[in-house]
Image (cartoon, grey):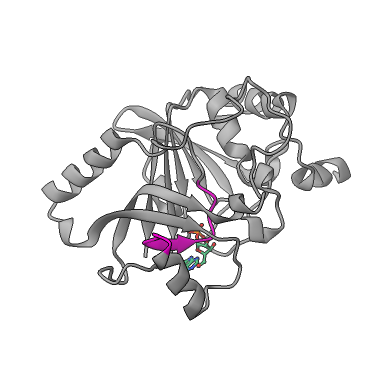
Amino acid sequence: IHLKEANRHRNCCSFDDCKLTTEWLLSRTRHRPKIAIVCGSGLGLLADNVSNKQTFRYEDIPNFPVSTVPGHEGCLVFGQIKGKSCVFMQGRFHLYEGYSLCKVTFPMRIFKLMGVETIVVTNASGGLCQDFKVGDIMVIKDHINLPGFAGQHPLCGPNDERFGIRFPCMSDAYSKDLRKLVLDITAELGYSNFVREGVYCMVSGPNFETIAEARMLHILGSDSVGMDYHNTRRKKFFFTKQ
Ligand SMILES: O=P(O)(O)O[C@H]1O[C@H](CO)[C@@H](O)[C@H]1O
Ligand code: HPA
């Protein structure tokens, strides 16, 4: 038990650590998801209505951190939506919980090893754009990784090419096709008046921004700000709810 607890905080994000966790999961589920959905604060209910549901508590998964924030259930849920296998994170990890960014992003490596190709990330965030209203949904088209500027980055350290290249290109981080799909579908549903596109800025939290900080982030080009690490590569996109 002590070792299990220690591993939650130990970095243990090596290829072998990730392989162990992936094999543990794949030997316990028949699901082979191609889509992963990360549920932000209060959005865990997205996983409630999947068929053939199978749930693992984070505390039972080797090397997985646990959720410590209210509104983050702490479960990995496998299931099908319209016949497509998906995996949901009911609760994500944050830098402000005391986890390293390597640990915060650990599930992304597991998803990659499991064969996931598309990641949908959702979170609660603060609107900076004057046109946004409380409750609007923003589809993220690009981001500013503020902690990354100060060396807080999960890809710092030795690079294992099995996970990807040393210098990933980020000029097309969020899939244009998927973003268009969201905008088309929400328009069809008549939601266009509260669905926006914009630039998300990550800060470490846990305090919300001062007025001066919020103004600065807006001047720098951010439309919304949150404490969630979403630094992703291709084929991924995410929503953020203001
Ligand atoms: O939806 P989540 O991930 O919780 O995002 C944001 O919401 C919480 C603050 O209200 C913080 O955790 C912040 O990161
Ligand atoms: O206004 C905010 N700022 C940072 N993180 C947040 N998460 C929810 N709202 C906010």
> In the rendered image, is residue 1 in sight?
yes
- List x then y, in percent, for residue 141: 34, 46
Quarter of the C terminus within the rendering:
bottom left
Give 34 or 220, whichever is nearer the viewer. 220
- Residue 165, compared with residue 12, is above or below; it is above
**Magenta stretch encompasses residue 152:** no
Residue 179 point in image, percent of width and height: 28, 41
Question: Is 87 in front, or is 94?
Answer: 94
Residue 42: give x, y in percent of width and height: 45, 60
Residue 53 visible in the snapshot: no
Q: Is residue 171 above or below residue 127?
A: above
Indicate the quadrant where residue 223 lies. bottom left
Q: Going 63% across and 47% down the picture, which residue do you hit?
A: 104
Q: Is the magenta stretch mostly helix, strand or loop?
A: loop
The range drawn in magenta is 220-230
Q: Residue at x 87, y 45 (%)?
A: 2
| Front residue of this view, candidates 4 and 49 | 4
Residue 227 painted magenta: yes
Residue lying farthest to the bottom in this orientation: 211
- Residue pictured at 40% horizontal, 62% vertical: 224
Q: In this view, does 211 lie above or below 173?
A: below
Residue at 53% from the left image edge and 73% from the top image edge: 208
x and y percentages locating residue 231 in the rendered image: 51, 44
In the rendered image, the residue lying farthest to the right is 2
Left or right side of 49 for 88? right
Query: From the image, which quarter does the N terminus lie in?
Result: top right
